[in-house]
Image (cartoon, coloured by chain):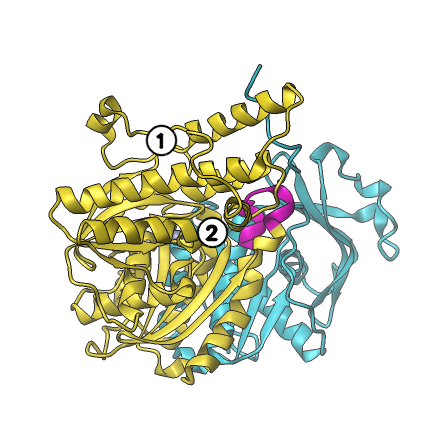
Amino acid sequence: MLSDPKTFLPEVSNRTSPLVLGIESSCDETGVGIVRGRHLLANVISSSMEQHARYGGVVPEVAARAHLEALQPAIREAVAQAGVSLADIDAIAVASGPGLAGALMVGIGAAKALAVALNKPIYAVNHLVGHVGADVLGPEGPFDMPAVALLVSGGHTSLLLVRNMVSDVELLGETIDDAAGEAFDKVARILGLPYPGGPEIDRLAAEGDPTAIRFPRGLTLPKDLAAHRYDFSFSGLKTSVARWVEIRRDAGEPVPAADVAASFREAVVDVLTAKAIAACVDLGTPRLLLGGGVTANRRLREVARQRADAEGIDLRIPEFSLCTDNGAMIAALGAELIMAGQPGSSLNFGADSTLPATLVHVT
Amino acid sequence: MILAIDTSAGTSVALVSREGEVLAHWETGDTMRHAEVVGSAIARVLADSGTDAADVTLVAAGVGPGPFTGLRVGLAAAVAFATARDIPLLSTVSHDAIARGYFAGLGRESQASGLMVVTDARRKEVYWSVYSGLSDGIPARAQGPALAKPEELAKPEELEPVSGHSDSLVRIDAGSVSAADLALVALAEHAAGIVREFEPLYLRSPDVTFSAGPKRVVQ
Ligand SMILES: [Zn+2]
């Protein structure tokens, strides 16, 4: 009697250069990617961002409905792009957390059925560590470890110490309130700019003076640094921007939107890069990897580059299609796990919206 | 062979031959663990019936009505299985499976009564459908599926006549949907050339509030 569902799935047959299909559905992007070992074959991303625009932020139910609709076309397109057949796939990888539970469950349901239908093993992997996994697909090959990873998006803002991508990841710090991307969206609303806020603020900030207004840098005072050296907070910054704008509007004064945008962006970028660089220096780890959708921000890349150069830190920023949420990074992490000899997941895992970064994959 | 998956209530998965013989069936009434159990449920019906995944030629997906998060898990699994094996995906209304089970259980002579199927929609609401009988194995749905508050649900005598026997409408409140019955409805519809578009029957809009602009922080 087959009572243990784990026995339903076979072992990986190819551990040297596995062909892995990865599914990502933790937020508003449905991603299906295919890799062979460290070689990227397909990266299909379908975003429901436009559907969220009128609500000013990601609506979990809208995102989950869009995942289900996008699933079949994305799988088919990825297979076509990769020039492989589904029967050739060696393993399935899927992000099982952290993220929006209802959204994650769509990818999980699909990934499990794919694994059973193809009789292939499944790897339930950590979305955050997946952002680190994206790096191995770049032209320069895998980064030396250990490295510090700064992962910034609308859903997360985390600082990790990665000693080994598949077996030893430590969470140094994370946001204690809003994610950095969320702060961009909220400040964009204050300034009457459309969603998503990141690109809008970036565009407007280009014409503004980043030193015009000194907005607070969250958790950087000595008393905060004691307990939150590598943690972030953006809620106070957002409130501070709102207050500054309201006072001008109440007084009938014009609001210099470009200066507000530039000064706000500078505050976010300053804290993100200062803490990431400090971690590299403190830990004697001269390697910094960026990931997440907010890395599209020009100023963040610029300041990270300047500060990394000044400290002799090697900086890695994967190309944008691999920085934003995608299935290729999930497939890449799955392939790394397989090549490192790690076992697959049992079929019993569920979505874990708060999966800790230290858990690289769920067995 | 047809693989049927329904997560509109609990999780139910069945493997049925093209001739309508139920080869394996697995289900749980747990309405909170669809994502956890759906994969092993599929693996189990294949293993229990000694079937290779490659021998499955059709997939039936229970499209609801059902509460969204759970419903979607089964639909995602059904879509993925059909895509992986490159076989047709048949969209089947979950209430139709309940109706089929009821009518088939009655036997041939006693199908004179109409049927109202009611299932839990959560948030103190129910999903309902009305049937007039079974025709060539396909439940004849006269009304629904629709969403209502239990107290607003029409009493049998208030419903529009169901082909002549509105006065003998039977109501069943179902807590589960059988994937085996779903498979049988799907096979009957497939044989009759009935093709339904793949569309989840959420019957409810997402919970969203339009932004009224940012809140003031200066009081
Ligand atoms: Zn992400």
Whether residue B36 sits left or right of residue B178 in the image: it is: left
What shade has chain B been given?
A: cyan
Q: Position of residue B6 (x, y in %)?
A: 53, 59
Q: Position of residue A312 (x, y in %)?
A: 17, 54
Segment tinted magenta in the rendering:
A52-65
Q: Position of residue A93 (x, y in %)?
A: 34, 65
Q: Is mark 2 within 8 Å of ligand 1?
A: yes
SS category of the residue bearing label 1: loop
Whether residue B197 sits left or right of residue B58 in the image: it is: right
Nearer to me, A21 or A279: A279
Crowd band around label 2 with a 10 angstrom C-alpha radius: few (<14), some (14–19), many (20+): many
What shade has chain A been given?
A: yellow
Q: Position of residue A288 (x, y in %)?
A: 23, 54
Question: What is the total number of numbered labels drawn onto the structure image?
Answer: 2
Nearer to us of marks 1 and 2 is 1
Residue bearing the label numbered 2: A27
Q: Decide: is B42 above or below B117.
A: below
Q: Quadrant of residue A322?
A: bottom left
Which three-letter amino acid code belongs to the residue tagged 1?
Arg
Callouts 1 and 2 on one subunit? yes
Residue A60 counted in the magenta span:
yes
Residue bearing the label numbered 1: A217
